[in-house]
Image (cartoon, rainbow, N blue to C red):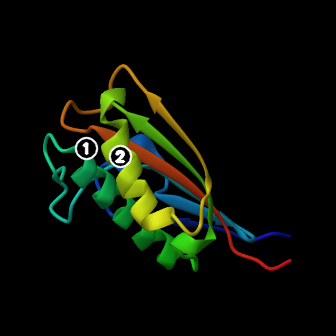
Amino acid sequence: MVSRRNFASGTAWEPLAGYSRAVRVGPYVHVSGTTATGENEQIEGSGDAAVQTRQCIKNIETVLVQAGATLSDVVRTRMYVANIDDWRDIAEVHREFFASIRPATTMVEVSRLISPDILVEIEADAYVGSE
């Protein structure tokens, strides 16, 4: 039987909506949509998609480490953005973290995210295993 472990970040959103920040099942880690929420549960980088992207990825990295993975294990990211015109800034930050890893990725503009202060939300999937 494959083990399942849930990981929480401690934000108020997780129990309110009934989800985990990340779930590890066997060698797979699935990270939920992650925003630029800082330690004080406020959105970092108000009005700046690049700053928010950086914080999203740092938040993803934190939970990956808790789950026994690293950014190097990421095989897929999905980026939901409030304004596709910010794509270059978002992509540049994504490249800072993933240039050598080059996960499969998607970036789409959405009509809105859960708060008007949120410009970017990122999901990630990682595989921790060997061939």
Q: Work out how far the residue at label 1 is from the one at label 2, CA to CA, in angstroms.
A: 6 Å
Q: Badge 1 local density, few (<14 within 10 Å), some, or many (20+)?
A: many
What's the residue at 33%, 49% (across, down)?
35
For marks 1 and 2 on the same chain, the one whose residue lies earlier in the sequence? 1
What's the residue at 35%, 66% (across, down)?
58
Image quarter for residue 27? Answer: bottom right
The picture places residue 20, in percent across and down from the top left corner, at: 49, 55
The picture places residue 121, in percent across and down from the top left corner, at: 38, 43
What's the residue at 37%, 37% (across, down)?
87
Q: Badge 2 local density, few (<14 within 10 Å), some, or many (20+)?
A: many
Instruction: Report whether 41 appears left or right of 22.
Output: left
The amino acid beneath tag 1 is Ala
**Closest to the observer: 1 or 24?**
24
Residue bearing mark 1:
49
The picture places residue 109, in percent across and down from the top left corner, at: 42, 26
Evaluate if marks 1 and 2 touch, with contact meaning CB atoms under 8 Å apart.
yes
**Closest to the observer: 25 or 99?**
99
